C-alpha cells in the first residue's frame, strides 16, 4: 500500500495494555488470530465508510527517555510512554507531522513504532506475589472459635512467596531484531523511509514484523526492526534483504541480527550481535 499525504485529522486515543498475568510464554492461537483479523476487518470497514484510507494494521508510537543510573527492568518499563495510535493514512500523517524530528531528540532516547497490542519490550519482569489465605467469618459463629480456626490453619499452611517470571509481550518472546547503525546526520532520513515502509506494509514477511525502533545515542543512531521468530532463518534473511531494498542500502552494507533471548542473557540491546549480513 502506497501512502499518500492527507490532511484530515484522526487520532485515536484508546490504548491497549499488554496482558501480564501469565507465568509462561503465551502462544497466539488460531482463534485469537481469527478474532484479531475480524476486528481489523470491522475497523477497516468503518474507516472506509467514513471516507478514510485504512491501514492493514493499527500502530502505536512510543517514546522512551532513558534515565541515568543503574538500569533495571522495572525502570525501563516505567519509562516507556505512549504518544499516539493511528489506523488510517490520514491519521498517520497527522501524527507523524507533529512528532519531533530525530535531530532534535536528546540522547539517549528511543522512539518506537509498533503494531497495536505489542509493546516494545524484550525484557521479562520478576514479581513477588504473596499467597494469602482468606477465611470468611460467618455471622452466628463465635468470634473466638473463628480465631482458633485461623490459628490452626496458619500453623498448617505457612505464608510463603512465589516468584513468577512474566513475559512482558508474547509477540516478542521468541523474536529478535535487525540492527542498522547510521551516522547521526543521515539517520532521520532512513528512519522516515523505514516508517513509511512499515506502515505501508511494504516489507517482506510483514505479518512477522512487530515494529521498529530509532535509538538516539551519543556518537551514532541505531535503527532496529523487530520480528516474531528468530529461529525462522528464511524469514529473518528475507526481512534483511527487504530492509536493504527499501532503504536503498548497498548489498554489501553490514547489518546485525540479535535474538531477544541473547539480549536477556547479556542485558544489552545492541552489543554482541548474533549474526552479521
Image (tube, rainbow, N blue to C red):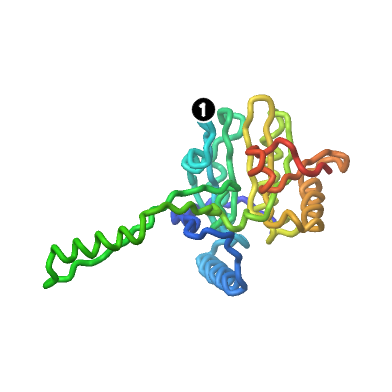
Image coordinates for residue 32, horizontal then vertical, percent: 57, 70
Q: Residue at x 47, y 59 (%)?
A: 21
Residue 130 lies left or right of residue 221; in this view the side is left
Residue 123 lies left or right of residue 263; in this view the side is left
Instruction: Count every numbered label the image shows and give the total.
Output: 1
> Tag 1's secondary structure?
loop
Q: Nearer the viewer, residue 245 or 138?
A: 138
Quarter of the image with the N terminus is bottom right
Q: Nearer the viewer, residue 12 or 255?
A: 255
Circle 1 Cα neighbour tier, 10 Å, few/some/many (<14 / 14–19 / ≥20): few
Image coordinates for residue 127, horizontal then vertical, percent: 46, 49
Residue 156 lies left or right of residue 104; in this view the side is left
Q: Nearer the viewer, residue 95 or 219?
A: 219
Can residue 43 be seen at all in this image of the molecule? yes
Snapshot quadrant of residue 139: bottom left
Q: Residue at x 82, y 50 (%)?
A: 241
Q: As displayed, is residue 88 above or below residue 70? A: below
Q: Which residue is mark 1?
A: 69
Q: Residue at x 53, y 69 (%)?
A: 39
Amino acid at each position: 500500500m502506497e501512502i499518500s499525504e492527507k490532511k484530515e485529522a484522526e487520532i485515536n486515543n484508546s490504548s491497549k495494555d499488554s496482558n501480564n498475568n501469565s507465568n509462561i510464554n503465551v502462544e497466539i492461537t488460531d482463534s485469537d488470530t481469527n478474532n484479531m483479523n475480524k476486528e481489523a476487518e470491522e475497523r477497516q470497514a468503518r474507516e472506509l465508510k467514513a471516507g478514510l484510507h485504512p491501514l492493514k494494521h493499527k500502530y502505536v508510537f512510543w517514546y522512551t527517555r532513558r534515565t541515568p543510573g543503574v538500569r533495571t527492568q522495572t525502570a525501563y518499563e516505567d519509562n516507556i510512554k505512549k504518544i499516539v495510535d493511528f489506523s488510517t493514512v490520514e491519521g498517520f500523517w497527522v501524527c507523524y507531522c507533529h512528532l519531533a524530528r530525530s535531530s532534535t531528540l536528546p540522547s539517549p532516547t528511543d522512539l518506537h513504532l509498533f503494531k497495536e497490542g505489542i509493546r516494545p519490550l524484550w525484557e521479562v519482569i520478576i514479581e513477588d506475589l504473596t499467597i494469602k489465605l482468606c477465611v470468611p467469618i460467618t455471622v452466628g459463629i463465635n468470634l473466638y472459635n473463628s480465631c482458633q480456626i485461623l490459628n490452626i490453619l496458619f500453623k498448617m499452611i505457612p505464608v510463603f512467596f512465589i516468584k513468577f517470571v512474566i513475559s512482558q509481550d508474547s509477540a516478542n518472546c521468541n523474536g529478535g531484531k535487525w540492527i542498522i547503525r547510521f551516522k547521526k546526520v543521515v539517520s532521520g532520513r532512513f528512519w522516515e523511509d523505514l516508517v513509511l515502509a512499515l506502515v505501508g506494509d511494504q516489507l517482506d514477511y510483514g505479518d512477522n514484523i512487530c515494529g521498529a525502533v530509532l535509538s538516539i545515542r551519543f556518537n551514532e543512531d541505531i535503527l532496529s526492526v523487530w520480528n516474531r521468530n528468530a529461529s525462522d532463518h528464511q524469514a529473518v534473511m528475507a526481512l534483511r534483504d527487504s530492509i536493504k531494498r527499501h532503504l536503498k542500502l548497498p548489498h554489501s552494507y553490514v547489518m546485525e541480527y540479535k535474538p531477544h533471548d541473547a539480549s536477556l542473557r547479556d542485558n544489552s540491546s545492541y552489543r554482541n550481535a548474533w549474526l552479521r549480513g
